[in-house]
Amino acid sequence: MLSGKVSTSTLDKLDTPEKSEQKNSLPNIRQLTDTRLSKKGWEDRYRFIMQLGKQLPNYPEEYRTEDHLVPGCDSTVWLCYEQVNKNNNTLRFSISSNARIIKGLSVILLSYYNEKTATEITNGNIQEIFDELGLSKHLSPSRNNGLLAINQRIIDSANRAIQQPL
């Protein structure tokens, strides 16, 4: 399905103790931007972002399908999400890619969006974070377009979750 929603049966697989540990291993967005401030040049920040990719939680194999591919990326990128709190429509996303820099950028996206409500996601402004990190001016046009495509897919998923809660 194009929405990228995770089925109820898969929620159990995503909430294993190992997965819960991985969810908590992502840095919060303030930790990321504060750490970035200690990096003097773009090359150091780029290396730091690539290292972040190692913190990306495992992506469910059963969602490495055509329906979960993010269009607009030169790299292969899969995205799915689950509703983790039905009372307030809190969402958690999973992302995977074959490119190391995209994996690192995905950690930034997940650190910003995961565990927020669908409404918070649609009202958020991650562009401020992108600007603070200097992503728009330092990434190649194709990488920047891919990052924006992933971001838009997350926002579209949140809009779908608002319109059709699980």
Image (cartoon, grey):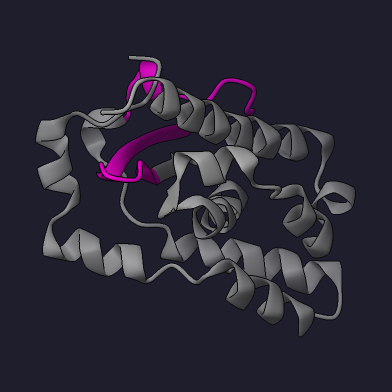
Q: Residue 45's spot in the image, x, y percent?
A: 74, 69
Range shown magenta? 64-93
Q: Quadrant of residue 148?
A: top right
49 left or right of 28 in image:
right
Quadrant containing the N terminus is top left
- Residue 83 in magenta stretch: yes
Q: Is residue 76 visible?
A: no
- Residue 56 in magenta stretch: no
44 left or right of 121 in image:
right
Q: Residue at x 51, y 60 (%)?
A: 111
Q: Quadrant of residue 83?
A: top left
Vertical relation: 24 (above or below) 5? below
Q: Which residue extends farthest right? A: 137
Q: Is residue 55 visible?
A: yes
Q: Residue 7's spot in the image, x, y percent?
A: 19, 28
Between residue 150 and residue 62, name the one nearer to us: 150
